[in-house]
């Protein structure tokens, strides 16, 4: 049984797509080898549910579409979905005992759109329970292991997605980003990931954590692979009340991000040897604080110098409420989680306690048994800040600070810079269990990602180097103004044309 899937012979989705259309390889061959590899790398604990029959049926359908001569853009490309997107056939557990055997009667919009584009799913990927965590240690089914170092976390909550891509098990994977849960695992696993503008991708069929923060985004090795996945994922969905019908005057439909990317890339090409001439990169002084490890700071500095060599100009800026993003997020997100997770009461679906006296005890026991410690912790925090006497003091105050954080970003974009760059995480991946005695320590590591999520801005992480003492990946965060996903991807692609960090792969452990 091979741990090296056939699709790893192709360096990008575009390259693989050409081979599929030329019939040099079939979708079924790709799917079969990927299934074998996923089983061979079960030690990573990246997958929660694999069903070969479902995968091969999708592969056969992709081969039929390829044989027709007019296949969709992703026909035959092997991917997998974070286990917070509901799926027909595969279980959807949100990595929780509460939903341990749940199978949805419908697909999430993200799932159905990627399937319509021809992608072939291997199954469901491990994550932090209900997407609550920064290390993928909160899964009820055990932690995911980082392919670069199995003793290290892959980041969270989309750790299974990042690990599967980094290990070469799939060409791309879906993730969700509430406070950094696409960008952070992408950074720690040495792959690329993007969180689009809030409302760009439908939340219909996504198991909810924080409704005003959750946004789906892809993880892949290259910026162009992210584009290939994000473009069909995006677009208005009338079934999602938070889905945007228009984006900055243009319709929010598949094709918008691709068009913006092509425009930005063409402008870069026209500029010649200085493709990024005139680009103003804002570097927040608050991102380079005492908590930032020197080796991470060094990798970020080297990446900024590459952008400067391409013609960009570095501009020092200030985001004065960066530190306040932590308490603000950890009031708002748990409050929304407390409301969203109240539906899991053991009545209609989900875990139900075996022994109870009355309805109230059944609900209490079911929730106590079904939810993990971190989920219970955040539910309690959220319930507290929403309770009578504390709503004004905590929740409303956090919403006021959130508006200030939005204003800080808008002031920077309106007069100082075109994009913002900095670190994704303060350090490289920690060891599994490092923060077991202080479960809130991981919250502090989200300092560079939370403000962007609170503001609803698009942001991405791309590999830019490795740590010194522990040679694990470091990610560069690129942040844009609303609806600039195509431009961010074009910038990342330009960087990846002159560097090879995104091509580095972990050795088979």
Image: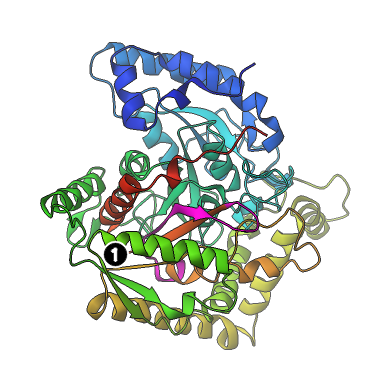
Extent of the magenta region: 453-472
Mark 1 closeness class: few <14, some 14–19, many ≥20 residues within 10 Å: some
**Quadrant (top left, top right, bottom left, bottom right) of the N terminus:** top right
Whole-percent x, y for residue 181 in the image: 53, 56
- Residue that badge 1 annotates: 308
Observer able to see residue 384: yes
Q: Which of 311 and 144 is in front in this view?
A: 311
Q: In which quarter of the image is residue 38?
A: top right
Residue located 25% across and 52% down the image: 252
Q: Taking 21 as reference, is 442 above or below it?
A: below
**Quadrant (top left, top right, bottom left, bottom right) of the C terminus:** top right
**Image check: 408 left or right of 385?**
left
Which color scheme does this rendered protein use? rainbow
Per the image, label 1 sits on a secondary structure element best described as helix
Whole-percent x, y for residue 241 in the image: 38, 57
In the image, residue 38 lies in the stretch drawn in magenta: no
């Amino acid at each position: 049984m091979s741990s090296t899937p056939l699709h790893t012979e192709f360096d990008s989705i575009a390259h693989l797509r050409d081979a599929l259309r030329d019939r040099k390889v079939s979708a079924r061959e790709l799917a079969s080898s990927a299934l074998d590899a996923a089983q061979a790398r079960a030690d990573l604990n990246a997958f929660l549910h694999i069903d070969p029959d479902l995968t091969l049926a999708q592969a056969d359908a992709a081969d039929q579409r390829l044989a027709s001569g007019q296949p969709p853009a992703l026909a035959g490309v092997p991917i997998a979905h974070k286990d917070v997107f509901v799926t027909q056939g595969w279980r959807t557990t949100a990595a929780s005992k509460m939903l341990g055997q749940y199978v949805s009667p419908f697909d999430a919009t993200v799932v159905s759109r990627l399937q319509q584009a021809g992608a072939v799913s291997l199954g469901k990927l491990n994550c932090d329970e209900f997407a609550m965590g920064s290390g993928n240690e909160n899964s009820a089914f055990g932690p995911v292991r980082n392919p670069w170092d199995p003793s290290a976390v892959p980041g969270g909550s989309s750790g299974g997605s990042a690990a599967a891509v980094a290990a070469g098990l799939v060409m791309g994977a879906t993730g969700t980003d509430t406070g950094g849960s696409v960008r952070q695992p992408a950074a720690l696993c040495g792959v690329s990931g993007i969180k689009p503008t809030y409302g760009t991708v439908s939340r219909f069929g996504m198991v909810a954590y924080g409704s005003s923060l959750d946004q789906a985004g892809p993880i892949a090795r290259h910026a162009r692979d992210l584009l290939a996945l994000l473009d069909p994922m995006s677009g208005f969905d009338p079934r999602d009340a938070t889905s945007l019908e228009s984006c900055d005057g243009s319709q929010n439909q598949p094709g918008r991000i691709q068009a913006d990317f092509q425009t930005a890339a063409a402008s870069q090409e026209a500029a010649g040897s200085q493709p990024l001439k005139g680009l103003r990169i804002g570097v927040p002084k608050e991102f380079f604080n005492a908590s930032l490890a020197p080796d991470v700071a060094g990798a970020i500095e080297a990446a900024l110098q590459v952008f400067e060599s391409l013609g960009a100009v570095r501009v020092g800026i200030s985001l004065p409420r960066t530190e306040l993003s932590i308490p603000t997020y950890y009031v708002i997100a748990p409050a929304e989680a407390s409301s969203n997770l109240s539906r899991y009461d053991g009545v209609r679906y989900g875990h139900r306690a075996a022994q109870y006296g009355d309805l109230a005890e059944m609900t209490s026991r079911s929730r106590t048994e079904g939810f993990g410690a971190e989920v219970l912790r955040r539910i309690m925090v959220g319930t507290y800040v929403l309770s009578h006497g504390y709503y004004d003091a905590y929740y409303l105050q956090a919403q006021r600070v959130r508006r200030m954080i939005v204003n800080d970003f808008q002031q920077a974009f309106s007069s100082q810079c075109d994009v913002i760059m900095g670190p994704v995480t303060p350090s490289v991946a920690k060891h599994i269990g490092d923060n077991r005695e202080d479960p809130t320590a991981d919250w502090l590591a989200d300092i560079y990602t939370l403000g962007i999520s609170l503001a609803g801005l698009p942001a991405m992480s791309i590999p830019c180097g490795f740590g010194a003492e522990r040679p694990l990946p470091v990610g560069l965060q690129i942040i844009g103004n609303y609806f600039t996903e195509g431009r961010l991807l074009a910038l990342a692609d330009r960087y990846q044309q002159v560097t090879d960090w995104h091509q580095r792969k972990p050795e088979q452990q």
